């Protein structure tokens, strides 16, 4: 997966990249983070903003001090002034429970990414950040009914490879290319 995902980060203009730390069977992002560091990219991890129920992103580079958030997921310990908003990132890799061929993502149900990425909705979504899901091919389903606040993803990386979304000829009985 790291090899497939890192291809998306290779262009020089892609410098600020958010990745998540896995929880509850999500795809391991450790190899991707290592690869991004080797490519000289600035890697950010999500930090819960509990009162606002959204996310900000903290730069993560060794030896960043980490702590467990209320969900038991590691996040960097940084001053609030060092946190970035999603619109300051070039690429965000998102976790998912399921995804369909149109890029509709089902997450863990907290809505943190939905609220954080609300600015990406509407008729003229911004060019950045580019939103890419990370998951297993078996997590692709034929249809997810999106809620009005859902933001479709622009691509999916699985253990099989990368697929831009939406997919035109989707066959749920075969693996993604």
Image (cartoon, grey):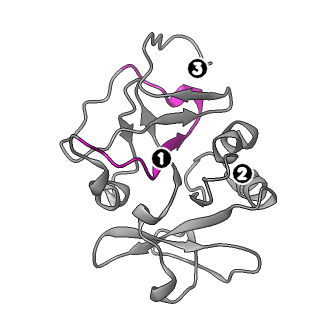
Numbered tag placed on residue 176 in the rendering: 3
Q: Is residue 115 magenta?
A: no
Span highlighted in magenta in the image: 124-142
Marks 3,2: beta carbons within 8 A: no
140 vs 133, nearest the viewer: 133
Marks 1,3: beta carbons within 8 A: no
Residue 61 falls left or right of residue 133 = right
36 vs 1, nearest the viewer: 36
Q: Is residue 170 above or below residue 117?
A: above
Residue 8 falls left or right of residue 117 = right
Spatial CA span between label 1 and label 2: 17 Å
Foreground label between 1 and 3? 1
- The spot of residue 69 in percent (x, y) is 50, 75
Mark 2 Cα within 10 Å, few/some/many (few <14, many 20+)?
some
Task: Say what secondary structure mark 3 lies in.
Answer: loop
Q: Is residue 115 above or below residue 107?
A: below
Q: Quadrant of residue 63?
A: bottom right
Residue shown at the point (47%, 10%) measured from the top left: 171
Spatial CA span between label 1 and label 3: 20 Å
Q: Quadrant of residue 143?
A: top left
Residue shown at the point (56%, 86%) measured from the top left: 78
In which quadrant will I find the C terminus?
A: top right
Q: Which residue is mark 2?
A: 32
Foreground label between 1 and 2? 1
Q: Which residue is mark 1?
A: 130
Mark 1 Cα within 10 Å, few/some/many (few <14, many 20+)?
some
Residue shown at the point (40%, 62%) measured from the top left: 87
Q: Quadrant of residue 40?
A: bottom right
- The spot of residue 60 in percent (x, y) is 65, 72
Marks 1,2: beta carbons within 8 A: no
Q: Is residue 50 above or below residue 98?
A: below
Mark 3 Cα within 10 Å, few/some/many (few <14, many 20+)?
many
């Amino acid at each position: 997966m790291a090899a497939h995902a890192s291809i998306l980060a290779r262009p020089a203009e892609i410098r600020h990249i958010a990745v998540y730390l896995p929880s509850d069977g999500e795809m391991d992002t450790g190899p991707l983070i290592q690869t991004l560091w080797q490519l000289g990219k600035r890697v950010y991890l999500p930090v819960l903003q509990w009162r606002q129920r959204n996310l900000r992103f903290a730069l993560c580079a060794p030896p960043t001090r980490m702590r467990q958030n209320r969900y038991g997921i590691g996040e960097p310990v940084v001053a609030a002034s060092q946190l970035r908003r999603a619109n300051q990132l070039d690429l965000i890799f998102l976790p998912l429970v399921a995804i369909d061929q149109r890029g509709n993502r089902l997450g863990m149900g907290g809505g943190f990414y939905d609220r954080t990425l609300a600015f990406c909705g509407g008729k003229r979504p911004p060019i950045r950040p580019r939103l890419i899901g990370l998951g297993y091919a078996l997590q692709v389903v034929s249809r997810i009914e999106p809620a009005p606040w859902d933001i479709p993803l622009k691509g999916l990386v699985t253990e099989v490879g990368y697929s831009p979304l939406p997919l035109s000829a989707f066959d749920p009985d075969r693996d993604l290319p």
